[in-house]
């Protein structure tokens, strides 16, 4: 899988956090890999590892987003936009293998694909404050 495809898979798995309790996420992760049969071997390990690293920092990531998003807070954000922002902020702050510009660009692309009409601009505007 390409890095973009891996990121999209991480996004899809991370999106489940909004609808499940932390206790249920291990089962959700298993179900995800059963349903998303494209992710196997090293790709599945990469997705799972990055998902778990982001999940461990959700409270911290939300705090950072609340600081930077003027007039917004994570409770008001759409779930798709919030998930994309969590992934991107994690990559900007904690993943040295992803340049900031790439993290922002990929987040905008995810917003175009999965978000609403204004999602790409919203995501780009918030992430620009992290650059």
Image: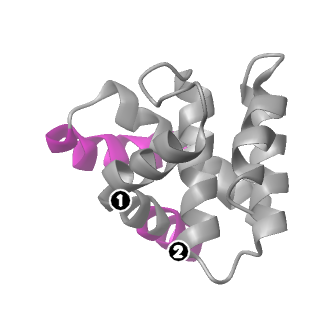
Q: Is residue 95 above or below residue 20?
A: below
User: Can residue 38 be seen?
Assistant: no
The structure residue drawn at horizontal position 48% and vertical position 29%, both measured from the top left corner, is: 73
How was the colour assigned to the protein in this rendering? one colour
Q: Are marks 2 and 1 in contact (CB under 8 Å)?
A: yes
Q: As drawn, is 36 to the left or to the right of 109?
A: left
Label 2: which residue? 94
**Which mark sits nearer the N-terminus, 2 or 1?**
1
Q: As drawn, is 124 to the left or to the right of 21?
A: right
User: Total number of numbered labels?
Assistant: 2
Disc 2 is placed on an element classified as helix
Label 1: which residue? 57
Q: Nearer the viewer, residue 24 or 57?
A: 57
Q: Nearer the viewer, residue 126 or 90?
A: 126
Looking at the rendered image, the quarter that the N terminus falls into is bottom right
- The span shown in magenta is 22-49
Return the x and y of residue 129 as percentages of the image width and height: 71, 52
């Amino acid at each position: 899988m390409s890095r973009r495809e891996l990121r999209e898979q991480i996004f899809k798995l991370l999106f489940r956090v909004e609808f499940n309790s932390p206790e249920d996420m291990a089962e959700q992760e298993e179900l995800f890999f059963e349903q998303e049969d494209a992710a196997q071997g090293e790709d599945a390990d990469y997705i799972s590892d990055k998902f778990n690293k982001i999940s461990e920092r959700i409270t911290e990531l939300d705090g950072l987003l609340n600081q930077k998003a003027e007039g917004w807070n994570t409770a008001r954000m759409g779930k798709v936009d919030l998930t994309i922002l969590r992934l991107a902020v994690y990559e900007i702050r904690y993943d040295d293998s992803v340049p900031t510009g790439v993290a922002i660009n990929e987040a905008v692309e995810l917003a175009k694909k999965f978000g609403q009409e204004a999602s790409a601009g919203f995501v780009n505007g918030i992430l620009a404050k992290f650059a």
